[in-house]
Image: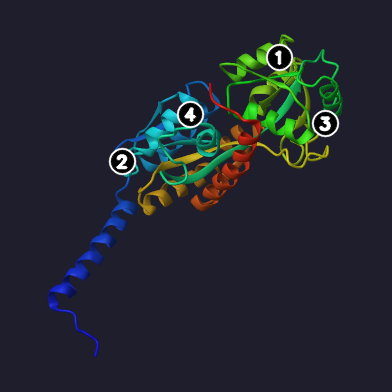
Amino acid sequence: MKPYLSLTQTLFISLLGLTCFNQIIFAQTEYPNKPINFIVPYAAGGGADSRSRQIGQQLSQILKVPVIVENKAGAGGNIGTEFIAKAPPDGYTIGMGNFAPLAINKTLFKTLRYDPQTDLIPIILIEKGPLVLVVNPSSSYQSVSDLVKDAKLKPGQLTFASGGIGGSHQLSAELFKQSAGIDMIHVPYKSGAAGLTDLMGNNVNLMFDQMYSAMPSIKGGKLRPLAITSKTRSPLLKDVPSFTELGYPQIVVNNWQGLIAPKGTPKAIIDKLNLATNQILKDPKVRDFILEQGNEIGGGTPEDFADLIKSESSKWSVVVKTAKIEPQ
């Protein structure tokens, strides 16, 4: 015989269900009702900063509240990303989640005070973009095969620049080394721009740089592109082959970024932010900004972004461990 619930129990269950329902409705209809803090884990003036300000401005217009962009740079993006992870999960602190803090740093740093897999919720991928292997125009290297041949003749003598330990510049080169079976010396700089300047000064042999950064110097004849890390050629560099095309299908690298929130942020809020950002990514001006830099427009669901982070973490942990990369 099935036990009957008492009137008190029935009322309690009903009230509990009504409370949960009201919370969902509140999140959908009342959020947001005050300014949103948008954290950028890198310094002002870079790619992450400019895209964050662009997206933040558009979010403010759609959500009808101020979106305040704040830079919290340092420790390879860890400081700002940790700040997001430890913020109240109420939707009023969100931020830009980047390639290194979400997929690299857990393997790279011995101690990390946040777990990108469990302490953060992906909202949406904003964009991803390939890197391009560039050399000085006076270099004897006219192709990737020229470079690989010379590197094998001079093991440990060729140098490659990067914007710092564990970033996409270095990781692309390390993947190239592992794939081509060559040995080169890493020369880290305080920024990608500093590394690029030394490359143009003929002080290092090569660099993998992000397209938006390298394109002006390529167009100006100050850099020679040899290959791109996307699966196919870029419309902006139609004469530059992809590594896949050259017989290195494992060298597919994209420097990506997207919106994230602290774990525990209600799903209704995540969905609302996802919907708004998908709308922004359909705006012709935003699309033009992204495409003009050689990047691919993101979008999709929170689950899509979560899958990307998971697969990238798995891939790059192997590269980091094989190369024995350690932060300075």
Whether tag 1 and tag 2 are in contact, CB under 8 A, the answer is no
Res. 292 image quadrant: top right
Q: Which amino acid does the dot numbered 3 rest on?
A: Asp
Of pointers 4 and 3, the one earlier in the residue sequence: 4
- What's the coloring here? rainbow
Kindly identify which residue carries mark 2.
88
Q: Which amino acid does the dot numbered 4 rest on?
A: Gly
Q: Is residue 276 left or right of residue 319?
A: left
| Residue 236 makes an appearance in the image | no
Q: Which mark is residue 248?
A: none
Kindly identify which residue carries mark 1.
199
Q: Please name whichever residue, 20 or 170, is drawn nearer the observer in this view of the structure.
A: 170
At which x and y percent is residue 139? 82, 15
Of pointers 1 and 3, the one earlier in the residue sequence: 1
Instruction: Nearest to the eye among marks 3 and 2: give it.
Output: 2
Kindly identify which residue carries mark 4.
77
- Label 3 and label 2: CA atoms lie apart by 49 Å
